[in-house]
Amino acid sequence: MKVQKRNTKGEAEKGTVLVVVVIVVASLATLSLTMVTRTQATYHEARDIRELQSARYVAEAGLNAAYVEMKSGGDGVIGSEQSPMEFGGGTFWVENTALGGGAFELVAFGSAQGGEIRSQLVLRESVDGTPSFGVFGDEWLTFDSNAFVDSYDSSISSYYAQKVHKDGNDEWANENGDSGSNGNISLNTNAGIHGDATPGVESVTTIAGNSEVSGSTLPIEESFVMPTITIPSGTSSGDFIVTGATTIGPGTFFFDTLLVENNKDLRIIGPVTLVVDNLVLESNSTMFVNASEGGADIYVQEDFILNSNVILASDTRDPSDINVSITANNIDDPDLEVDLDMFYNPDATVEFDSNSKMFGTIVAPNAYIALDSNFELWGSLMARRLHLDSNSKIHFDEHLNASDETEEVFYDIVGWVELPGLD
């Protein structure tokens, strides 16, 4: 009887293959389970990201809405936790917290598709308008001995009723007579600025002798842009010479030269616009504006001269009633005259003589203006270069900023960040 041998080698190989198959199947099962788990995790993660992204969009929309509202004069508060605003399938509300120093914190709470986000926007208030300074010299600003600047509010009472501070022989009203330049500011002996003295970005304020600055002397963070002047167009009627008591207005008038002779008076009925090449008020003359129906806008393209003992004012002495815009450039063209000096100076262009008084605003972005001794201005003054001679005084009217129709409040964005999630 023949005995058949078993193929143990084949069986062993079959067993090995079976083991390998089992291992592969187990591995594939494990891999599949891992992939399913990872897929589920990725799905949940993607869903969370989508939810948070949706909430983020809603919160940012809330911040944008609050920012626009603040620019329009609102308080930036939109909705509330109890009564949120609906947007894009989600809801938001915005809270506003004053941080001081003109800074505000807007926090938007956004919710969408189950996600919740808080976003923060920090704003700092700025004011764009004219005047921002009571006194400003674009290229430089200097004060001689005993020249000074202070402030008052014409909407409250007269300057003299508010002049309550006294230190020795010095008397002044309020401390908001801010003075500035895009260059250097210098004060000689006994000069004073009752307010900030703000030099240019890389410039300094020099204080000599017993001079004082009551506010900050830190440089400006960004250069100040001088106002631009647009001259109304029209045909000149030639020269207008005031040889006796004269009244003009209301209306718009174009002259080559407007001259008020010594000891003579010109009365203007507003609203009036005067466009002249030259404006000269000789010694002891006056120009009064009746601004009950509107003030006077005066444009001077060449010479502007106020001789000694001149008065230029409205009947109520409100500085906002008279606005003088000077386009003359006596720096590049010395033949022009812009002077406030003791005596008529044929070599000056803008002349403001001693003991003269003016209630109004002056903007001269191209001119060098030198205020002579004892000249006094209630209002504001801006020029390319500005020099205050000894004992000259400027009383900045704080109400000009409040009443300036061109003034615009805007907000600089300091920071925009996402805060930790809601509790």
Image (tube, helix red, strand yellow):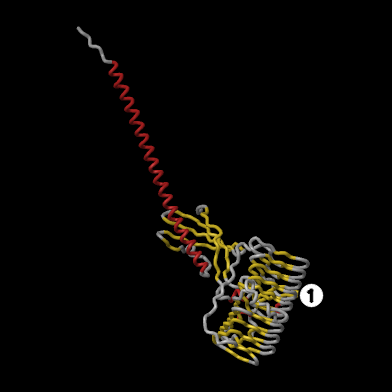
Residue 157 is drawn in which quadrant? bottom right
382 versus 59 height, above or below: below
Location of residue 150 in the rendering, given as x and y in whole percent from the top left corner: 70, 73
Q: Residue at x 40, y 59 (%)?
A: 89
Nearest to the observer: residue 252 or residue 295: 252
Q: Residue at x 29, y 16 (%)?
A: 9
Nearest to the observer: residue 278 or residue 1: 278
Q: Residue at x 59, y 88 (%)?
A: 269
Is disc 1 placed on a helix, strand or loop? loop
Nearest to the observer: residue 41 or residue 259: 259
93 versus 251 height, above or below: above
Q: In the image, is 180 to the left or to the right of 119?
A: right
**Number of numbered discs overlaid on the protein picture:** 1
Residue with the mark numbered 1? 169
Q: Residue at x 61, y 63 (%)?
A: 100
Near mark 1 (Cα within 10 A), the count class, few <14, some 14-19 or many ≥20, is few
Residue 323 is drawn in which quadrant? bottom right
13 versus 115 height, above or below: above
In this view, the residue farthest toward the top is 1
Location of residue 303 in the rendering, given as x and y in whole percent from the top left corner: 63, 79
In this view, the residue farthest toward the right is 168
In this view, the residue farthest toward the left is 1
Confirm whether residue 64 shows in the render.
yes
Residue 41 is drawn in which quadrant? top left
Location of residue 11 in the rendering, given as x and y in whole percent from the top left corner: 28, 19
Confirm whether residue 81 shows in the render.
no
Mark 1: which amino acid? Asn
233 versus 224 height, above or below: below
